[in-house]
Amino acid sequence: MERYFITIFTILVVKSINYIMKSQMFLWTFFSAVWMLMAQVAQKSDQLFADQSPLKVKLSYSNNDMRLETDDTTLIKTNLSYWNENKWNDLEVSLRARGNFRRSKCYFPPIKMKIKKSKAKETLFEGNKNLKLVVPCLLQKEKNDNIVQEFIAYKLYEKVSPYHFKTRRVDIEFTEIKKNKEVVHNLKGFLIEDDKRVADRFEGKSFERYIHPKAMDKMTSVQNAMFQFMIGNTDFSVAYQHNGKLLYIDKVIHPLPYDFDLCGLVDASYAIVNSNLGISSVRDRKYRGFKRDESLIDEVRDQFLKNKDLFFEIIENQQNEFELVSEYESTHAYLTSFYDIIEDDTRYDRQVIEEMRTK
């Protein structure tokens, strides 16, 4: 009988210790998140992204001129008209194409936008000297829906890590200048803030150089890896900053991902499968994170499980932005397939834990 009570007592003590440790971990995570939010420095550039309703804009330029292979100093000057405070406003901007892959493959190349400080002063764009404008790639029926899908990916990551890009949807009336005529395209797009703005928000720096992922902050590294797995993205390299930047904040390095158009969530027609990873479809998932303590991976798994309703809400809030019902349903179903994995211990172990990289 005495041995029985000792056994029961031991079990209760162990369970109590586990509970306390989990509670402490939760409180540490919670207060760390609160501290990081409070640590963010307000910037003038934030006003552009404060309103999350789509901003109406008008642009005009030649796609052929934009696609020309030039250096980063060759810019096309044009006028950006935008609807704000119940009137059209004009802003002089300079544009150039960005991205090697999309510049060669896309009818509409993605845009890097530069704005002079003097021109942006006392406008909605004040504080934003550099912006990315993401536009559809090809002239296809799902072109605008692909934009909404990639925009959703950015919004999902906002809930994963405090170290993210601010974005805002835009509805673009684009007048394409051709030799003998002008063609008007109604496009969906979105603006992305400059990485220096993200760094400044945390009083840090953004930089590019080879850094092994295991030298980076372990929590944000695993969060990024799980996020990339969720959206089915394999077109990135944290070490070499392919489709990502690095932030140096308080002597700690954090990944800052971007460009998700080739992921399974978007499922763009021009996406190319990386067969070297043992996948046969863009919709196939492959966990690309490096080996870490399983307790850390499980903590991030719990974060994603707790955010399940929030993530689905993000997609559902964009439902009216989709032009094709099938594209919305595909997006919703793809997120469901992610939770089918991480809610099942066997599938989670096989597709995440056992796939952690060692090199």
Image: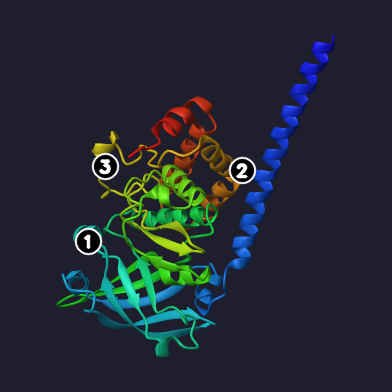
Q: Nearer the viewer, residue 200 or 150?
A: 200
Going from N to C along the chain, the mark reached first, 3 or 2, is 3
Find disc 2 in the rendering and name its residue. 306
* Label 2 secondary element: helix
- Picture quarter containing residue 180? bottom left
The one of 195 and 101 positioned closer to us in this rendering: 195
Is the residue marked by circle 2 packed among few (<14), some (14-19), or many (20+) residues within 10 Å? few
Q: Amino acid at mark 1?
A: Asn
Above-or-below relation of 260 to 305: below
- Secondary element at image label 1: helix
Q: Quadrant of the N terminus?
A: top right
Q: Residue at x 28, y 59 (%)?
A: 137
Look at mark 1 in the image and give the residue it sits on: 100
Identify the residue under disc 3. Answer: 273
Q: Is the C-beta separation of discs 3 and 1 under 8 Å?
A: no
- Label 1 packing within 10 angstroms: few (<14), some (14-19), many (20+): few
Label 3's element? loop
Question: Residue drawn 23% across and 60% down?
Answer: 106
- Asked if residue 192 can be seen in this view, the reply is no
x and y percentages locating residue 117 in the rendered image: 41, 86
Q: The disc labelled 3 sits on which kind of residue?
A: Val
Disc 3 residue crowd, few under 14, some 14–19, many 20+, Cα 10 Å: some
